[in-house]
Amino acid sequence: MKYLLCFLFFAFGLGVYAQVDLPLDSLLNKAFVNKDSAQYYFTEAKRKLKTRADTANYLYFKFFQQDVARRSDSTVYYSELALPRLRGLDSLERMRKIYERLHFQELRSGQYEAALDFCQKALSIAEELKDTSMISLHLSDKSIVYHDFEDYARGVEYGKKAFDIMINSENINYRYILFANNATGINFDDWGKADSALYYHFENLKYLSKVEDSLPYAFIFNNIGNTLLKQKRYDEAKKYIREALKLNTRRNRAYNLASNYTNLATIAYRQGDYSEAEKQFELAKKYAEESESIEKVRDVIQQEAWFYKEIKDYRKALEKQEAFYVLKDSVFSTERAATVAEMETKYETEKKEKDLAQTRANLAETELKVKKRNNLIYGSLGFAMLLGLLGYLLYNQQKLKNRQLKKEGELKAALSRIETQNKLQEQRLRISRDLHDNIGSQLTFVTSSVENLKYGLGEKDQKVAQKLTDIGTFTTQTIYELRDTIWAMNKSEISSEDLQARIANFIDKAGSARDEVLFNFNVAHELAEGASFSSVQGMNIYRIIQEAVNNALKYANASNITVNFSKTDLNYLLRIEDDGEGFDIEEVSFGNGINNIKKRAKDLEGNAIITSAPGKGTVVEVTF
């Protein structure tokens, strides 16, 4: 018994508050462990009580002393003294343990609605503490209460909830997995669903290897045997129940031993061994009375009634059956069943009500703090308003100053940008004028001089005349290109309309020079309206078309040259296609013209692809 008391002391966490000194704690510990000297130590401890925490600690030990001794009235008495003091100290874990023990006391006596009430209070505290293990444990406890009250559907529901809470926890404690599965299994068993019951009990056999000590879990073997017994598999049942009996005998647990001996007695009389059944019934009655559990006493009496009916001792069978009904009627009634059903509804709303009450308490506390703070504010309100007004005026003045400085800065920057743009435009115009007036006039003079030389030579030297013609043609082409360059330089931005007109003009001139070639120039609708390019982009596009068309005219001997300019969602597409002689790309080395096209495509941040084959014409496709 002493070892049992020590175990309970540590299991229930009989720690001390920081306010309690070691001598008081030592006295309470001795009072709890030493049964014979308990009164002396409690008396000595009582003399040392100084604070509210000391008193709460003292009453907490007294409660567990009475609970272990099974003194029901005294247990209730000390719980009523201890709980208000613990609540004032916000000692939720100790309150949870007291409610847990009160639940067991009421369960033993068959007061199921009270047991359910205390169990729910313990569960509510566990939820407030966010203690997953204890939440699972108290859900299993509720499952057992409903089992004993024969509401098996509700019992299964809470057993499964207990399992789900624990199996999905970050830190799985298999002790509570075993409790949850056991609660679900025994509900299925007495519900008449043996296969489901055996599933959960055999699952527990698998989980048993995950706990350090299997001794406290003898109930697993007993409950397997109990279900096998109901299936009339007596020899298998006896094997499991005897294993449970061996473990429970080592622990001397009266409640569990009562179950073991009741099951063994039932197996014995059903197998026709009546003398063995009587021996087992005597042991079952002994331990059922020691356990003080109405449920266990009731189970023994019911089996005895069936036993005496089996051996045709109808007088004793009737006596036992009447005793069974008396016990059952003391536990079950229509009124009590209705009370338990109402409590379930109450429990579903309890958490919301608790949260609402906590919210109201927080609001009340906040209001009190606000009231105190307001009183302080009112005392210095005038000074605060003056400081606020001065601060506001200074802030506004600084804000206006900052805004003015910002606007001045933006104006300076804008003027600087405009000035820079004007200078660039002036520089661009100056360069274009220089090109036009100086280089352009000089090239025109060269062209005129060449023509005069040709005229002076007449028919005398055809080779020199041809050379002069070539120089004149080159100079004329240079003048055209110079004009194109001046056109691009005079614009910071080239619209699609300007570019289209320039390209069309070039193609018209090319067509005039070569009547035998048919030219087609197509610009997509989305490009013809609103598209624009930088002067560099516009010049590169124009030069690519010019280079490709000139190549087709010089080398391809084409009948048709088509220029298409279009736009996709992401890119511009420039395609120059002819139906000329074509060439083998693998065998021909590209000259400056093709290389220039590729370089200009790269400058446009795009690429050029030249496709050709002998007799199939040539396609120049630029994407940028």
Image: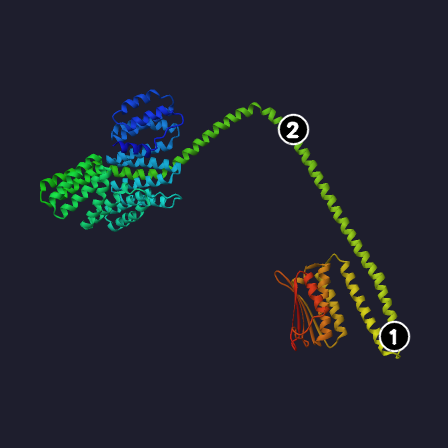
Q: Relative to 615, is 412 above or below? A: above
Quadrant (top left, top right, bottom left, bottom right) of the N terminus: top left
Q: Give the residue pinned by disc 2.
A: 390
Q: Relative to 386, is 226 above or below? A: below
Q: Give the residue pinned by disc 1.
A: 454
Type of amino acid at the residue the image marks with label 2: Leu
- C-alpha distance separating marks 1 and 2: 94 Å
In the picture, measured across the screen, residue 189 lies left or right of residue 448, that is left
In the picture, measured across the screen, residue 370 lies left or right of residue 497, that is left
> Where's residue 500, x and y in %?
71, 64
The residue most toward the right is 456
In the picture, measured across the screen, residue 502 lies left or right of residue 181, that is right
The foreground one among 138 and 155 is 138
In the picture, measured across the screen, residue 311 lies left or right of residue 557, that is left
The local crowd at label 1, few if under 14, some if 14 to 19, many if 20 or more residues have their Cα within 10 Å, is: some
Type of amino acid at the residue the image marks with label 1: Lys
Q: Residue at x 67, y 36 (%)?
A: 399
Secondary-structure class at tag 1: helix
Foreground: disc 1 or disc 2: 1
Q: Residue at x 77, y 63 (%)?
A: 484
Are the residues tagged 1 and 2 within 8 Å (C-beta)? no
Q: Residue at x 20, y 48 (%)?
A: 239
Label 1 vs 2, first from the N-terminus: 2
> Where's residue 536, x and y in %?
72, 59
The local crowd at label 2, few if under 14, some if 14 to 19, many if 20 or more residues have their Cα within 10 Å, is: few
The picture quadrant where one finds residue 14 is top left
Secondary-structure class at tag 2: helix
Q: Check residue 562 in the rendering and tell me which mark sits there, or answer none.
A: none
